[in-house]
Image (cartoon, helix red, strand yellow):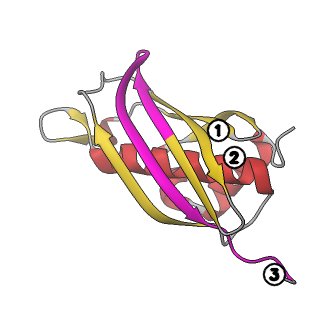
Amino acid sequence: MSKVSIEDFNAIIASELPSAADSGVYLRSIEPGKAEMVLPYSEHSLRPGGTIAGPFMMMLADVCMYAVVLSLLGEIKLAVTTSLNINFVRKPANTELVARGSIIKLGKRLAVLEVSICSNDDIVAHATGTYSIPPTSGS
């Protein structure tokens, strides 16, 4: 069972991640080591040329990684991104984007993750990242 619920994580987005909340992003499913986020389609997320801008996909990947980390560790506010790499594979359709994230390795101080971002079931971007996990008391 995930250490954070869908409702709790969506509340974190609403109260503590205002730029993500403004985009309408939300957590659809979560289980230990896995999360699925949705970025609803909006004309506000478009770049010149009429496609969804890369920074919106990067935000989606990063928030999805955060959900994966919290699914394993519980609500740790100071778990932070230390690296994020994204490859844009193809132009997404003008529809919602779905991010599916999973843990690659969870260590004592670092978590390594990956996220596939899909548009109409086609992968449009793939991201990998590392999160720093703050020390717990006594470590």
The three-letter code of the residue at mark 3 reads Ser
Instruction: Evaluate whether residue 67 shows in this view.
Output: no
Image quadrant where one finds the N terminus: top right
The three-letter code of the residue at mark 2 reads Asn
Q: Which residue is mark 3?
A: 139
Residues at circles 1 and 2 in contact by the CB criterion of under 8 Å:
yes
Q: Which mark is residue 27?
A: 1
Looking at marks 3 and 1 on the same chain, the residue that comes earlier in the sequence is marked by: 1
Q: Secondary structure at mark 3?
A: loop
Left or right: where 33 falls relative to 120:
right
Task: Give the Cα separation between the discs numbered 1 and 2.
Answer: 6 Å
Task: Give the Cα separation between the discs numbered 2 and 3.
Answer: 30 Å
Q: Is residue 96 above or below residue 8?
A: above
Residue ID at (57%, 60%): 17
The single residue placed furthest to the bottom in the displayed view is 138
Looking at marks 1 and 2 on the same chain, the residue that comes earlier in the sequence is marked by: 2
Left or right: where 77 falls relative to 21:
right
The residue stretch that appears in magenta:
115-137
The single residue placed furthest to the left in the displayed view is 49
Q: Secondary structure at mark 1?
A: strand
SS assignment for the magenta stretch, majority: strand
Residue ID at (27%, 43%): 53
Q: Which mark is residue 10?
A: 2
Q: Nearer the viewer, mark 3 or mark 1?
A: 3
Residue nearer the viewer, 25 or 65: 65
Image quadrant where one finds the C terminus: bottom right
Q: Secondary structure at mark 2?
A: helix
Mark 2 packing: few (<14 Cα in 10 Å), some, or many (20+)? some
Is residue 78 one of those drawn in magenta? no
Residues at circles 2 and 3 in contact by the CB criterion of under 8 Å:
no
